Amino acid sequence: MEFLHKYKKFFILGLIVLSLTMMAFTGRNNYEQGVIRSSVGFVLSGGQTMFANIGNWFADRFDFLRNMNNLHAENIRLQFENDRIQIELDRMLHLDEENRMLAEMMHLYRHYADYATIGANIIARDTTNWHDTFTIDRGRNDGIAINMAVLAPGGLAGRISAVGFNYAVVTPLLEDTSAVASQSLRTGGWGVVQGDINLSSHGLLRMNYIDMDADLAIGDEIITSNTSAIFPPGIRIGEITELGQTAGGMRYAVVSPSVDFSRLSAVLIITDEFEFEFLGE
Amino acid sequence: MRILIYSLIILFDFFVSSTWLQHIAVGGIMPNTTLIILVSYALLRDDVEGTIMGFCAGLLYDIFFGRIIGMSAMLMMLTGFFVGKPFRDFFKDNYIAPIIMVAAATLAYELAYYILNFLLLGRTNIFRYLGMVILPSVAYNLILCIFIYRAIYAIDGIIFRREERKRGFMK
């Protein structure tokens, strides 16, 4: 300790240089999780799973107490809903059958329905207010790889941005650096859905770089485009709630995602390498 | 002994803030408890120990969540250093110094984080970020810092007395 006090300036400078060196080496390829990162993450994610389970247990008890009064009403409502969904499902199965028949007739590939998916629980979230990234309890040993698409009830949630042995980090659509090539389901009008930290606190996304002659309207459903390099086409992102123009004359749209990010507790990951399908065609 | 206890505290804080603290976020804004612990510790001890603790805590975050390893480590380390530096002899029972230092450190840290991670990527709307993220987190940290400083003060007192006693026996 006294040694450090004596050479304080060199010590501080040394640590700064060390940090800068690490930044220089990891800034370029932030995708690769090295041995050290991976093994530290292995230990930490175990602890996080434990803490998350304890926290969820208490949150569940608390929710139960709070919602006890309207459980009966909720139950009746869900029963009705269930009946309605059952009828809907029968109709959908019928349509699906019909769709497959038609698609076979037209020699089309059915992209969306056949993806192999794997479920995962969210165990931890980023500790700063700058990022919305979260950690899930599946990793390399479950077949997860970088840039796989992450789905949640409602549609697209984000992509895998880092993978460890038994955990993976998900960058959600809300993240400031996230961008998805997307299009309107109705007209095919093209744009890029990006996270925006000012909108993401309200749970909203922003669509930038909209095509010059794209025909967009409020209420349009936005899906992933087939120009996207990492996301399979046709996955639902959300719907347009606001259209506008920046001071520079660029059009933008505010998109309300169909995934409720504030209540997310589990996600699905598409483990298929969908790009190869295109190459095989 | 001291190193072990503070390592456990930092680790515990990391687990808690990545899991439980998410439930008490107000309007999507969470307190940065790691920063409060670091400032309290650097105030009670000195700049060198603040630097070491900041470096370790920042590195922990970087390794697990960080996109670029070393960014938070450097910022946290500098925070620990500057907080520990000028306040060698203040009344450690008093809350005013920690409150001011936590506010200043949070403001400086978050601003530096914004500049390195967002401004350099072309997100130039600084007042928007200031109002939406930085100032709310400063306010939240201010409230929590009173409790956390109290706790760190108590823990540090216990460790200090133990060390004194041990030193006494040695002689």
Image (cartoon, rainbow, N blue to C red):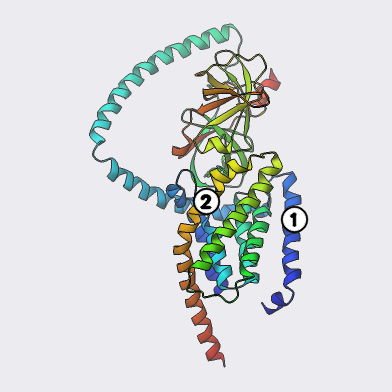
Q: Which mark is residue B107?
A: none
Identify the amino acid type marked 2: Ser
Instruction: Confirm whether residue A58 shows in the render.
Output: yes
Residue ID for mark 1: A20
Quadrant in the picture for the N terminus of chain A? bottom right
Q: Are marks 2 and 1 in contact (CB under 8 Å)?
A: no
What subunit carries mark 2? B
Quadrant in the picture for the C terminus of chain A? top right
Closer-to-camera residue (A34/B65): B65
Q: Secondary structure at mark 2?
A: helix
Identified at 68% across, 26% down, the residue is A248
Residue ID for mark 2: B137
Residue A214 placement (x, y as % from top left)? 63, 15
Residue A154 placement (x, y as % from top left)? 47, 27
What subunit carries mark 1? A
Quarter where residue A205 is shown = top right
Q: Is residue B12 left or right of residue A71?
A: right
Closer-to-camera residue (A15/A92): A15
Residue A90 placement (x, y as % from top left)? 38, 15
Vertical order, B19 against B51 (above or below): above
Label 1, residues with CA under 10 Å away: few <14, some 14-19, many ≥20: some
Identified at 53% across, 68% down, the residue is B97
Give the alpha-carbon distance from disc 2 to disc 1, as whole Å. Answer: 27 Å
Residue pushed farthest bottom? B171
Vertical order, A232 against A57 (above or below): above
**Do discs 2 and 1 belong to a common subunit?**
no
Identify the amino acid type marked 1: Leu
Closer-to-camera residue (B164/A130): A130
Residue A187 placement (x, y as % from top left)? 58, 12
